[in-house]
Each structure stands twice: as structure tokens, then as C-alpha cells.
Image (cartoon, helix red, strand yellow):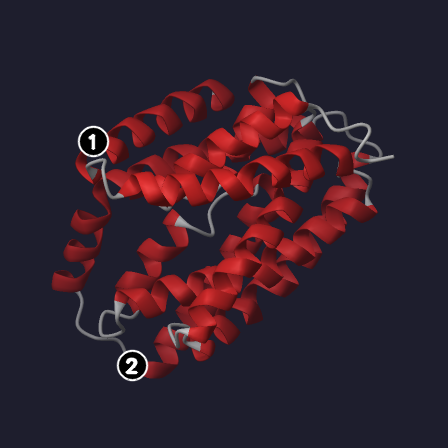
Amino acid sequence: MILAAIDPLYSLAGVAVGMLVGMTGVGGGSLMTPLLVLAFGFHPATAVGTDLLYAAATKSAGTAVHGAGGTVDWKVVRRLALGSVPATIVTLAILSTAGARFDGTGRIITTTLGAALLATAVAILFRGTIVGYFTRRFAPRPEPQVMSLTVLLGAILGILVSLSSVGAGALGMTVLLILYPNLPTNRLVGSDIAHAVPLTLIAGAGHWMIGSVDFALLGALLIGSVPGIILGSLVATRISDRVLRPILAGTLAIVGGKLVF
């Protein structure tokens, strides 16, 4: 039944987004969710819920690769999850209750999504400057403070991802680079991806329970995104990152502004 309902146009969108993810490393939620809302006219809650399960499936493969390569710091993952899991559950409970009696739920999701896209654009363009500023300004923090701030980061990401499906990638990585300056970047990337799996899975399951997941759409996106990510990863070595990232950041800023205003 689901296969029969799959629209090839959505699979083509999956290919396009997958290629951009493969070329830039930016999370698919930053690209897919606004595309589903603005181009295809899906309700914001449906776009977010479907994209969350889509992200959980695609990031599981990335976690397996990083885990096998030893580039996941599970201590960082546990700290993030300690904040994100409860925050996600509470956010979804509020969303479920409000959705049944509040007509502005879609608008809240759209505004949060737009703000997250604007912040992601800033993080993509100025990550090095932001991390360098905080690293120079503040001395290394004591371990208990780092742990508390990591849990707080997880909680913020849990709320943000549950409402918009955006934030666990570029925004989370920027803060992790500030909190853990002595950890290799590839371990932080692996940890960020590993944490995104339970976060997006729990948030996606919650959206499924409140009826905001389109499984035919999910199947179409997965069919297109897997070859798209592979193709994008192959092409990435031939395109300058200095060209791609400003274009991507500018696009996200324009889309984010449109959603907010």
C-alpha cells in the first residue's frame, strides 16, 4: 500500500537533498523540512514528524560507520541524551495537547523552523570565528561545568529538534567544539551523529503517535536520499567547500526569513 502511494517527485527531492547533504555535511532536516512545507505544501507538523524518522534512518548508518571507526565519544553522547530525551518527551507532550485545541501549532512550528534555519546559516558561515572567539575568551572549564553545559545543550536541542527537526547538526556541533576544544573534531562529529539517532527516533516516534508522520512520503524520501547521499559524497571532492557553504548558508537564511516573517 505504501509503495503504491509513493510519489516519484518526492523521491527526486530526496535525491536532491541527499546530494546536498553528501556534499556539505549539513543535516537533511535543514533542507528537507522547509522544502516539504514551502514547495510541497505539507503541514509543518507532518513535515517535521516525517523528516525526523527519515533522519533517524539515515543517521543510523552514519553512526554505524563512526562507531566502527572508533570516532564516537559515548560519554559526550550520554550527556547530550541526558538532557535531550526528557526535553523531547516534554515538548512532544505539550505539542500533542496543544495540537488538539490550538490552531496556532503549525505557526509555532514554522516560526521555530525559520529561526533554527537562520541560526544554522550563521553557524555554517561563521563557525570558525564563533569557536575561536569563545576559545580565546574563556579558560578551559572544570569537568562538572562542562558536563552540566552539555546536558543543557542536549535539552535545548531536544526542544528545537522536536519542534523543527533542525539544530542537532550545525548548531550542536558548534557548541560541542567550544565545550570540548581538546577532543578531535572527527570524534565530536561522530558523537553528534550518534546522539542524533535516539533524539530523532524518539521525537519521530512521538510525532507518529500524535499522527503527524506520512509513511508514504517517508518511503519516497528514503528511496531517493540513499543514492543522493552517495552521489553527493563522490562529487564533494570536486567542488570547493568555499563555494558551496556560502551558497547553502544564504539559501537557508532566505528560507528561514521567509518562514519567520
Residue 24 appears anywhere in the view: no
Vertical position of residue 60 compared to residue 110: above or below: below
Q: In the rendered view, does 166 fall on the left or right side of 214? A: left
Vertical position of residue 54 compared to residue 147: above or below: above
Label number found at residue 243: 1
Examine the image and state in which quarter residue 47 appears: top right
Q: Residue at x 79, y 43 (%)?
A: 96
Q: In the rendered view, does 114 fall on the left or right side of 109? A: left
Amino acid beneath label 1: Val
Q: Residue at x 21, y 75 (%)?
A: 140
Amino acid beneath label 2: Pro
Q: Which residue is mark 2?
A: 142
Observer-nearest of 35 and 143: 35
Observer-nearest of 132 and 11: 11
Examine the image and state in which quarter residue 250 appears: top left
Q: Residue furthest right?
A: 1
Residue 197 appears anywhere in the view: yes
* The N terminus sits in image quarter: top right
Q: Please provide percent x and percent y for residue 66.
A: 43, 68
